[in-house]
Structures are given as structure tokens and as C-alpha cells.
Amino acid sequence: MTRATRYGIASLALYFLLYFFEDSVLEFTSRGGWYFIAPVVIAFVFSYFHGAFTSYFWDTLGIKAKK
Amino acid sequence: MELTTATNFIPLDALDVTYLLVVGFIGGLVSGFIGSGGAFVLTPAMMSMGVPGIVAVASNICHKFPKALVGAIKRAKYGQVDVRLGIVVGVSAEAGVLYGAHIQEIIHSSFGDAGSNLYVSLAFVIVLGIIGSYVLWDAMKTRRATGDEPEKVSRIARWVQSVHIPGTMVYFKSLDARVSVLFTIPLGFATGMLAATIAVGGFIGVPAMHYILGAPALMASATELVTAFVMGLGGTIKFSWSGLVDIRLAMIILAGSLFGVQLGAIGTTYVKAHMIKLVMGTIMVLVLFSRALAIPVYLSELELIDTLDPHLSSALLNISFVVLIAALASGAAIVFAALWRGISASRREIALAGTAFAPDVVATPASPQLSPLGRFERFLLATDGSEYSAGAVREALRMAGKCGARVRAISVVTGGDTELYAMGEQLITKELNTARAHLDDVQRQASAAGVACESEATQSNQVYQEIAAQAEKMQADLIVMGRRGRHGLARLMVGPSTVRVIGHARCNVLVVPRAAELVGRRFIVASDGSRYGDAAAVTAARLAKLCHTPITVVSVTRPEHSKERKREAHQIVGRIVSFLKQEGVVVEGIVPHGRPDEVIVQTANAKNSDLIILGSRGRTGLERVLLGGTSERVIDQARCAVLAVKSA
């Protein structure tokens, strides 16, 4: 399995979880106060997996930086 | 809490999600490219879906910081990011954001929505009007006037870098200078204030880092991503403390924008600095128009001008929004076009390097010439972009035009594996980018001269080895290069690339001093009667026929030579003269006396010759140092070009 596929599946899973638990996630992240950490952590986690996926995605398509 | 959720967070359908993904992608593309400026359209876009303004702002900023992080990491891989500068500016920008937001609140409480909107629009128009027009003007000027020359540090940046305030100086690698934080703090503060006002701090941050601090445009735009990350993280904490972030909106936009930011970052490796300015300037000026259109509406609402017809107000606001979208779309279109052109050119280059110059193609050359002697079909042009290479570039293209040769231009940046860490990866990348910019210019000159040309910037510890290896790889017939003006001890110790290349290359090497011109006035062929001299004669015949140029054959005798040797010199000259006459070349022969190198150069000067052709024995290393070489000294002293011919 390529890295693009691995990270793609992880990213898709995250978005699926967000969609599936939409109401709970929204309620938890909008509590305010010290719960501010929730949206920040979610953003970091998504950016790690989805960021890696998008990088490998363009790589797989042959769109790479000029060496 | 549920009430808050119900009020602030709207239900999303498939159309909303698609809309956000697309706008997010385009915004990400622009942000990845210019470091900022991709997000300003997202807040109004979300509001147009019915998202309350404050939630739109909060969700936008929550998608911005992870996007900026991913973009910054990507561009750091290309050596474009100055993390320290980004953080220093970012931290002071946080203060600017807080102060900017405070001013917004005061204006809002005093003048209401219309007053707040008017303030934001005026900020847009004034800031973008001044900075945007300047950036666009500078982009045009850079492209028109200097082509691909390395970026110049502005006068104000030179002054800023020259000011020394004890206790406040910090070294920034993007500037390669120590700058007082008393300069960076106000710039960061202004960036933050603008971010709090118009949502795009980078419209001040990037130009400030470039024009005021002196960072290269590519590095300024990449470093802005670090600043945006710091500001975005602070903003997200602030808004999510109040529970205003709609994480769904933020993550959906992020899904599209991360595709965009990666692509935008890749795009920066294919473009020259002025493209960053062009995209940024274009977006800024269009956004300026967008906001200017809305100003009469707010003035009317504040009753500062006659009340506008509601239809007119609505039309102006709609047109303003469309222009805003058009601004982002135009920026994205320029990025796409630059990316497409860059990738296509790069692929052509790779294809040429891999196919056109592959040995199996060499087996069936286009011309009927079978001997490698005097064959001029493939040139390797080695240039370092300096004034010393200017003659080599000019004459390589002129000669390639006459011979119908293909040219591969290379620029070798010193600093291989062992030096990498000492030099710093970013510095090497900067050097490579400068080299690429120069090579692009060479390609343009070649294209204008109708010469097939490809180019490559490479990196190696030993320049001469890399040039010789590249020539071997492409089976070059000729290496064309400039000559550094080193003399004496420095020359001996440093070992100039030119002489070393001649020693190591298997093909002929043409050395062109910067002022030399190869117009075909007269060629000088020097021979000592060896097979190297014969090779020079054969090559000279081919060139003379191509250029319709007369030749003077020289064989120098030394005072210590025996009579027999002197007689032999006459025979050598006579033999070559008859050969050249048979070839239909106008030729004369002379046998002067003296030190060969001095006499050859004097003869060339006296005859107003534009090329000296001589055989090279190809000595290397210690042998060269101990024995010296006539060809080497001729190259050093000649005002005209010198062709060192290798025997087959």
C-alpha cells in the first residue's frame, strides 16, 4: 500500500468520523473556556494526516517540486 | 449550549460542502504561493451561506493556522522559510491583532455596522492602494527591466540592515544580516493590525519583509506562512475560548485548502521572484476595486452622502463580492499558468537530457560528419551567471547558430554533501534558484537566436568534475565556458575551473573571455607538429569553412631549438597549410621565434584574430603544476577566445 493510500484512508476516516459524530463534535468544540483545546487539537490532527495525504497525492500524480 | 449551537451553526448540505471545498482549494493555492491572501474571500463566502459573521471569522482563522503550518513545512523543505523571522514577526503580529480588534470594537460601538464596514473598506483601499500598486509596479519592472537577474535589496532594506542598536540585534538567515527587532516589531504589529481589519495580514507582512527588511520575495512569502500560523493559532484560541469556531466549516475548508497549499508551494519552485509579486499585486489591486465599490454604500448608510437607491446599493455590494472572487480566481489562474509552464518546461528538459543526448542517439548523428574531430553538434555551455560568463553565453549561442548545434546550458553551484551543512541548505537553494533564473535567461536568448537549448542547475563539490561529467553524459562535442581573471599565485592555488575542465574533459573546450567576440575575422592555429596540433588543424578547417574565415598557422621555435627542429617547424606549417588549402580555406603560415605562449598571443593580437585554436595534451594534476602548459598560459593571456582541441 502506498503512503498516499495510507494517509488518504486515515484522512477519509477522520472526515467520516467528523460527519458521523457531527453534533457531538460541534457541541464539544463550542463549549468555550478551556475546551478551546479541542478545535486546536482537531485542526492539528487533521492537518497532519490530510496534509501528508495531499502531499503524496500530488507526488503520485507526478506534480513535484523542481529539483 | 444547544441554543447557541442552533443559532450559530447552520446545517450544511452537499452544495455548501462543495462550495467550501472549491473556495478552500483556490484560497489554499494562492496562500501556498504568496504566503497569504487566500483566505479573505472565505469569510464573505461563508456569510453568503448564512453563517453569522463572527462564526465565519472564527472558522476561517481556525482553518488558516493548520493550512499555514502545512504550507510552511512544505516550503521549508525547499529552503524558503526563515522560521526565526516568521516567529518574531508573528509574535508582534499577535499584539497587532489584539490592538486591531480593539479599534474595531470601538468603531463598532460608536458608529455601528456601517461605520465598521466603512473603516474596513477604507483600510483596504488605502493599504492596498499604496502597497498593492507598488508591488504590481515592481513586479512589472522586475520582469521588464532585469529579466532574471538576482533580486536587488532595496535601498531602505540596506539602510535597515546597516542600523546597529545594541541589545536588539538578531540574525535572520533570509536576510543574511543582523537586524534590530525594533524594526521587525512595528512591521509585525502592522501585519497583525491589518489581519484583524481585513483578514489578510500578509498584504503588509510579505512586502515589509521583502522591501523593508530585504528578504528575497520567495523567502518573504514562505516566511509569512510561519507568521500566519502564529497569528492563526492565537486567533483560534481566542475565538474558540468563546466557543465560536464551527469546526465542521474549518475542516471542510481545510480539506480543499491543503490540496491547494501543497500545489501552490510546489509552484514556487518553478517561478521567478517577480511572479510572487505579480500574483500578490494583482490580487491586492482587484480587492482594492472590490472594496472601493462598497464604500459609497457605507457612506450612504452613515448619511455622509445622499442616500443611495436600495437597488444601487445592493448591486454595488454584489459587484463588489464578484470582484473579490475574481481577485482570488485571477491569482489562482496566474499560479496555475506558472505551474503548468514550469512543469512542462521541466519535463521537456528532462526528456531532452534523457533522450536527445543518450548514447544510442549519438550513434546516428544528424550531420554526415563521422569524425569527432571538428564536429560541432552538441555544445555544453557552462555558465555561473557572472560577468565572466557573459562572453561564453553570447558566443556559444552565436556559434551554435552557425553550426546548427544544440546547446545544453549548465550552472554548477558549489557545495556538495560535505559542505551542505556548513553552507546551509537554504543558502544552496538560494544559489540554485539564482542559477536557474540565469539559465532561464540563457534559454530565452537561445530561443531568440533560434538555437535549441535546454538548461540545468546542478550542485557539486567540484565544479570542473561536474562539467566534465555532464559533457561526457551528453557526449558533447564542445564545452564553452568563460575565464576568470585570476593570475599568479591565487590562480595556482585555487585552480580555476576552466583549466581543470580542459584537463579532465574528453571533448574540445572553448574559453571565451568576457569581451571576446567570435565573428570570424581570422583564426590562429598553433601546432608543435604533434597529433594534438594536427587535431587542432582539422578542427580549424571545419570551423573556417563554417565561418568563411582565413587562418594563420603558427609553429613557434624557441631560441634553444636546434636547426633541425627549426626546419621541422617549417615542415609542420607547410603540411598544415597544404591541408587547409585542400580544404578550400584561405591560409598563411608563419614560423616565429620566442616563447610559444607569448608569441601565439602576440600573433593573435597583431592579426586581430578572434580565435586561437591549439591542441591540448590534457595534462592533469601534479604534471600540470610542474610542467605548466602552453595552452594554459595562452588561455590566461589571450584577449580573444581560445579553443583547446582534444585529439581523438
Image: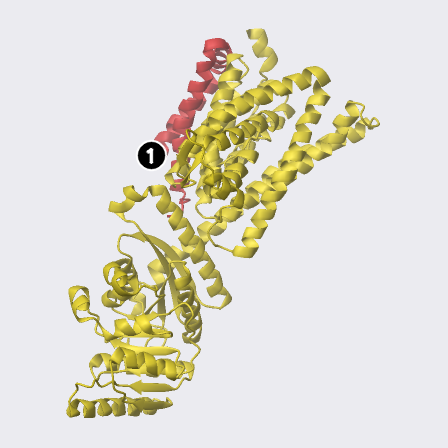
Chain colours: A red, B yellow
Q: Quadrant of residue B605?
A: bottom left
Which of B294 and B9 lies nearest the eye of the viewer?
A: B294
Q: 10 Å neighbourhood of mark 1: few (<14), some, or many (≥20)? A: few
Question: Residue B453, relative to residue B271: is it above or below?
Answer: below
Specify whether residue B627 is in view.
Answer: yes
Give residue B90's position: percent from left, percent from top: 48, 28
Q: Is residue B439 left or right of residue B630?
A: right
Local secondary structure at mark 1: helix
> Circle 1 sits on which residue?
A3
Query: Which of the image's four quarters has the C terminus of chain B?
Result: bottom left
Q: Quadrant of residue B529?
A: bottom left
Give residue B612's position: percent from left, percent from top: 33, 78
Query: Which of the image's four quarters has the N terminus of chain B?
Result: top right
Q: Quadrant of residue B297?
A: top right
Question: Residue B377, relative to residue B155: is it above or below?
Answer: below
Q: Chain of mark 1?
A: A
Which of B176 and B81 lies nearest the eye of the viewer?
A: B176
